[in-house]
Image (cartoon, rainbow, N blue to C red):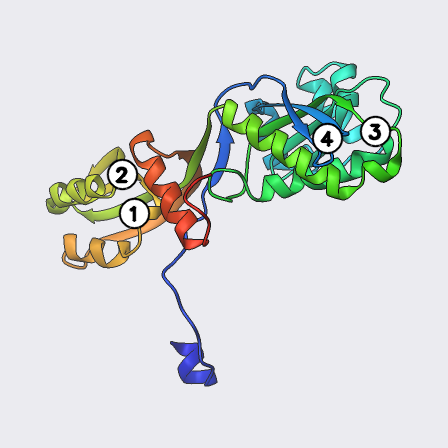
Amino acid sequence: NRIKTEKGLDVQTSPPIVVYRETVGKESPSVEGRSPNKHNSFFIQVEPLEDEIYEAIKSGELPEGRIKKRNQEVSDKLLELGWTGDMIRNVRNIYNGNMFLDETRGEVHIGEVIEMILDAFEMVMKQGPLAREPCTKLKISLVDTKLHEDAIHRGPAQVYPAIREAIVEGMKKANAYLLEPIQVHVIEIPDKFLGEMTKLIGSKRGQLLGVEQEGTNAEVKSKLPVAEMLGWSSDLRSATEGRGTSSLLDQLFEKVPTSLQLDVIKKIRQRKGLSENQ
């Protein structure tokens, strides 16, 4: 409103958009992705990234980026986390909380196509198969390849679709699911509104984490899905006669309830103009 009134600029607005994340629940078998010309095959395995590795990436202890030669900082941290030298040598890319490993052995032409493979990996990590939302906490391993001898038959038009097909199929076989953003709030209210507050949190798929009372005031700690928090301020005012205040304590991602996932995916795909079928 201030941009319109003070600056005289016209602003187009839309309802707020909640960005989800896509990840997997288990290890997939090796999945083959074939190039459109049928001359190249890439065998890829998808699995969840270990918690401690993911936390190290999030905290910045493991720097993101492509790894073309031995990176001492990455090597030292992975050794500290229990990885062997062989596993560390396979790491080729750390991207948006995901990791790509090249586990192929003795493949003559891999050096000529690895950058294209990593490009395709990053494309899928930006837009996953379920709803074209960013992927997180994935470990993608290239376990084998069959490449055509002639470089003209293994260009980007052949590599990109094959890698995308293999990762997408691998994610589906690894039980891909959505993560939704969650906020932890500390809500301060007069204690007489505790009942109303509990009802409000429950109506928003929220979870009550704890209540502390001091005199006639109460402090409520709760976990709330961001998707249910549109209009939260006015709902809080209504429930507490304008006397409740809410402050953000933490943010995290948690699995979307199974009963809601298909509906959430359908709505996101509709908003993005995608077909309903993944």
Element type at mark 4: loop
Foreground mark, 2 or 1, reads 1
- Residue underneath mark 2: 206
User: Which residue lies under the disc numbered 1?
Assistant: 228
Q: Residue furthest front?
A: 37
The amino acid type found where label 3 is placed reads His
**In the image, 77: left or right of 180?**
right
The residue nearer to you, when weighing 88 against 139, is: 139
State the separation of the CA atoms marked 4 and 2: 50 Å
Assess disc 3: are there few (<14), some (14-19) or many (≥20) residues with their C-alpha within 10 Å of its C-alpha: some
**In what element is the residue under mark 3?**
loop
Identity, as a three-letter code, of the amino acid under mark 1? Glu
Check whether the beta carbons of the residues at disc 2 and disc 1 lie within 8 A of each other.
Answer: yes
> Do the residues under discs 3 and 1 have CB atoms within 8 angstroms?
no
> What residue is shown with label 3?
148
Residue identifier under label 4: 38
